[in-house]
Image: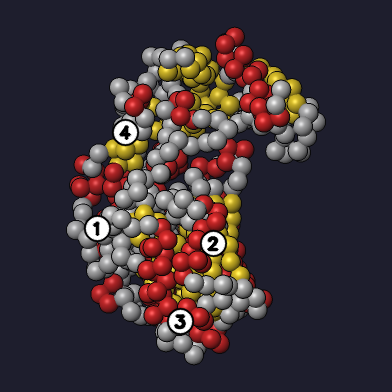
Amino acid sequence: MPEENKTIDASQPFWDGIAAGALVMQRCTHDQHVRFPIQDSCPVCLSEDYEWVPLSGKGEVLSKVTFHRAYKPEWADRVPYDVIFVQLDEGPRMFSGPAEGHQGRLKIGDRVIARFEEVQPGNRLPVFAGEGD
Amino acid sequence: MAWGRASIVGVGASRQGKLPGSTSLGLGREAFVNALADAGLTKDDVDGLLTMPGSSSPEGAKHYLALGERLGINPKLTGSMNMGGATAGALIQQAALAIDAGMASVVACVFGDAARTSGSKFDAAQGAEVSWGGWGFFGNAANSAMGAARHMALYGTTSEQLGWVAVNGRRNASKNPHAVMRDPITIDDHQSSRFIVEPLHLLDCCLITDGGVCVIVASPDRARDLRQPAVDIWGMGQGHTLQTFEKEDWWYLPHQADAINRAYDMAGVGPSDIDVAQLYDNFTISVLLWLEHGGFCKPGESGPFVEGGERIGLGGELPINTAGGNLSESYMQGWLHVVEGVRQLRGECGERQVEGAEVTLITGRGMTLNTASALVLGKGA
């Protein structure tokens, strides 16, 4: 495998997790820090040793915005649509979107849980639904 | 005790606005020529050249090389930096350190960008390692909108309160003959302007313009022999959150408070000493956060602070963005904030002059929301 492709290849477990219906992220085996975005070393202790662990998929909506402008053609028929900022229970934070049926329904402070949906054709990603739904 | 070991001796801007056929280098040259004339210097006096490549600069990190070639300068000290809207303050800090160390005697800090006519790059998808675009997250407005939405949820801040920042900027721009957008706006105009990324309306967002700016730094002794009243650099600070989401409260940008407090400490001043402030306004929410980070009000209280526009207006307790800022004067990524700060201390701002202005705070932020710089400038004795 060419060296320059190493980091791309290293993200495969994340995508495999999505395909299997689990939110899988890297946990440092030295300090147990769970990190996201994916990178090849721990930003806390700089260790390169880590394992892929399934997360609960649960978290809280830290913030939410609604795109009224389509910045890319493939989003033109989707506006207005929400993007949320999620605090995962295990520590990492990420941008994501509402699960099907949750557009316009998630609010800041809501408890949410991950689902896995094809957000755009051929692009299956974690999205979030209300935890009680 | 203020630091005061370097001074701003010249400021200059190019034409601003929609300038077909202009280039980053050409606009930088135009500003450089104007700043030299302002200072009463010639290009042969300049022995330091620090630059910020514009978003339209094909030279990238070699921008200093291309600009030096165009200006016919072989400096003792040079380089380019890009920390987005924090660059103006950060480069001027580099210039001040070089002056203080004796590595150069006159340092020109230059920015130019043909962002408007070359096609804006500011809407590009964010993130190299993870594409947030997968969830439809694009552009710089969205990051600030995330912060605005959370500020609203936590503190009850309203869109109308954000609107007062826009109204204030335009009101000041109407008194600035060089501002690109000078027609006054109302809160109703702000509220009825279309949403870009909710909660941010169009009038919460800065302009995209072509233009260049140059700021010339020299020693305080040299400043006192030159054409303009001396404006001294009292304090300098930076703060950064390079980790983005790894940092709790990233959305609130606590590093901006660090940048300001470092500048205050170096200057030996606090918020009550600031007569006028130029606070980086890529979006209206930015100004609310700066007001809290600068200690002008408590966390969460910036909405009521700006409401009605009196406190932040000319004649108010803290006039801000007196030339119109990024929202109305021109989007020079904070460089014109420095120019206006200098002009206020020189007392040359005409009908937008803040009477008796002796100390000013100038802030910048950039690279999504991750970098911040602050300058405290003082009127020379």
Q: CA distance from mark 4 to mark 1?
A: 23 Å
When the figure is inspected, residue B113 is found, relative to residue B75, above or below; the finding is above
Q: Quadrant of residue B334?
A: bottom left
Disc 3 chain ID:
B
Are the numbered discs 2 and 4 placed on the same chain, yes or no? Answer: no
Q: Position of residue B25 (x, y in %)?
A: 42, 61
When the figure is inspected, residue B300 is found, relative to residue A29, above or below; the finding is below
Q: CA distance from mark 3 to mark 2?
A: 20 Å
Residue B200 visible within the image: yes
Q: CA distance from mark 2 to mark 1?
A: 33 Å
Q: Residues within 10 Å of mark 1 (few under 14, many from 20)?
A: many
Q: Residues within 10 Å of mark 4 (few under 14, many from 20)?
A: some
Label ID, residue B181:
1
Residue at which label 3 appears: B42
Q: Earlier in the sequence, mark 3 or mark 2?
A: 3
Residue B326 visible within the image: no
Q: Quadrant of residue B323?
A: bottom left
Residue at which label 4 appears: A69
